[in-house]
Image: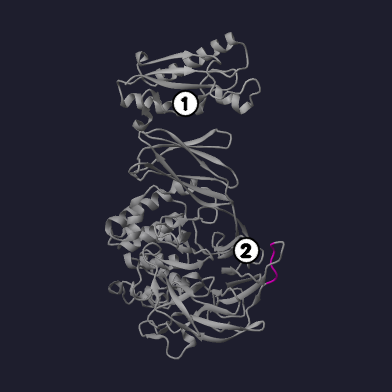
Amino acid sequence: MKNLYITLSFMLAGMAVTAQNKYTKEADKHFGRFEYVEAAEAYKELVEDGKGDAYVYKQLADSYYNVFNYKEAVKWYDKAVAAGNADAETYYRYAQMLKAAGRYEDANKQMRQFASMAPNDQRAKLFMKDPNYLPKLRNQSKLFDEKKLDINDEKFASFGPVLTDDNTLYFTSARNEARKTYGWNDQPFLDLYMSTWNANGTFSEPVPVEGVNSKWHDGPAAVTADGKTMYFASESFKESKQWQKDKDVNAKIGQVYLYRATRQGDSWANVQPVPFNDKRWSTGNPAISKDGKTLYFTSDREGSVGDTDIWKVEVKGNNTYGEPVNLGPKVNTEGRENFPFITEDDKLYFASNGRPGFGGYDLYVIDLKNNSGEAMNLGAPVNSPQDDISFSFNNSKNMGYFASNRSGVDQLYSATPVCGVEAIVMVRDANTGKALATARVSILDDKGNVIETRTAGADGKVTYNIDCDRAYTIQAAADGYENNSFPIAKTKGGQVTVSADLNPVEVRIKYPVFEAKDIYFEFDKSNITKEAAFELDNLVEAMKKNPELTIMVKAHTDNRGSDRYNQALSSRRAKATVQYVISKGIDKARISGEGFGESQPKVECAPDCTEEQHAQNRRSEFMIVKQ
């Protein structure tokens, strides 16, 4: 069903005319008229009559591909490839159907063949950049919980859900059985429907949208924030001579067109086509910005990167517009990009089958305000091995909606955000800004427990997905640099960037004191804590880079306990510190330690010291004996 809104013309251009013959004429006519159900039956009859060949197998596979019958598509693509002379696009489609069937290793094999045949195709480049992307996708933190809506019709397709701020859910559906059926998939023609969102999250019984539905396909739609203007997709047959005659298949070939309507009471009126429609290409699937000044849409018009791209155009008012602008390779691939939706904070959601994903169409989001940002897969469970499309998000309700054919036919789902934060850590040289590749980056919870440690990539970057409303600490370390810690404050979600700038260890050496943070101990204990170890590693790095450096450790206690006891405790602390440094590969002749008990407090507070002052006095300091 949604394939109608990809394009109504590109399939004809892709037919291997030279392989047609008198036996395939009837089947080819169905295929050319987008009657894929009838086409598949006709091609299968040829196979049963012993007239199957590479062309017939490919046409059979493509027929099933276009109605997303992946089981049959896999079967016939396998035969088409085995017959020889398959083109690159056939391998690509075969890979997509294998993914839909959950056969990911086989899909990767076909993608490698596709990439070898079309190395400059952006889809090939994206795949070869990370061919083993799937485990990462599967382990990606869940962004949404999904739930099937109770307003679906289990038999007929529904997609394109958009919830407006006046609590109206608009969507497109084939549920009107009084309508004639469409040969593409033998479902009724599409109509626009609406349903009211209730405070408990349920929806009223859907009803057709008044004033916009016609005898042709209608929908999906986008409505401006003020509720006064609707943009929706329909067909060019509504307009005089806005179609082309194809004599080979004896059919009029129309296009998807965009229309504009205005509200009149509880209905819509003044339906007009937008002036940038053109019978040479499809223009559909609208999305409108919060301010109503930018209209996004899907088209295969001249200048497209792939089969269908996402475009935008300035809205000037009174159904006048600027020149359409392609969103470029940050969004579009040589595959199909479709179903744009723009949030009030300029996040663009869209569907694509040209990017590494779970299979079929996957849903992605990109922040258009961030010029260096990349499109991100929404992950499971929103995405599945089947087609997942038409994602929209209502900021005021904090709720998303989308459609998927994972149950066999396109159905509507809600997407409830799982509150999470993406923490992006960038480790760099504090002096030069150079990225520190292979830096070790740990994330600690609010109790100081290390959750995970990762190694930075060539760009010095490490990304963690963390919980909302929880504080964290980042610890970064790199050879030749002093370790350091960086806090992450509590946040309600979104993305935070941690600039983990590290200083070269040389800046710590200022005779006669090695300027390290003091090493603190727990009350009445002498063992090295993980916090102390993190700081002592800076001393170790400095001593490795300066082989003549000799250090004396001075250990201290607070003033609780007797002088004799505190002297012994401080000596144990000095020895523990020295032993840690030696354990990291430093010659024992280069480090010594001495305990000073409570005789040299950092904070003079006796006899009424606070717990914090006591803690400051329980420490080790470092003196340079030789440099």
Density class for disc 2 (Cα within 10 Å; few <14, some 14-19, many ≥20) is: few
Image quadrant where one finds the C terminus? top left
For badge 2, the amino acid type reads: Ser
Image side of residue 523 versus residue 96, left or right = right
Query: Looking at the rendering, which quadrant does residue 547 occupy?
Result: top left
Task: Write down the region rendered in magenta.
Answer: 201-205
Look at the image and tell me whether residue 48 can be seen: no
Residue 553: x, y in percent? 44, 18
Question: Splitting the image into 4 quarters, where does residue 461 fall?
Answer: top left
User: Is residue 603 or residue 351 the one in the foreground?
Assistant: 603
The mark closer to the camera, 2 or 1, is 1
Residue 315 is situated, as x and y percent measured from the top left of the image, at 47, 78
Q: Which residue is identified by label 2?
A: 396
Q: Which of the pair 606/419 is nearer the observer?
A: 606
Q: Earlier in the sequence, mark 2 or mark 1?
A: 2
What residue appears at the point 37 percent right and 41 percent down from the top-left corner?
Answer: 430
- The crowding category of the residue bearing disc 1, from other C-alpha atoms within 10 Å (few below 14, some 14 to 19, many at least 20), is some
Q: Position of residue 372 (x, y in %)?
A: 39, 57
Amino acid type at image mark 1: Ala
Residue lying at the far top of the rendered structure: 564
Inspect the magenta stretch and tell me whether residue 204 lies in it: yes
Q: Is residue 294 visible?
A: yes
Tell me which residue sits at (49%, 45%) in the image.
139
Name the dominant secondary structure of the magenta segment.
loop
Indicate the quadrant where residue 280 lies.
bottom left
- Farthest residue to the bottom: give it: 240
Magenta stretch: includes residue 134: no
Query: How many labels were placed on the picture?
Result: 2
Q: Residue tagged by mark 1?
A: 533
Does dot 1 land on a helix, a strand or a loop? helix
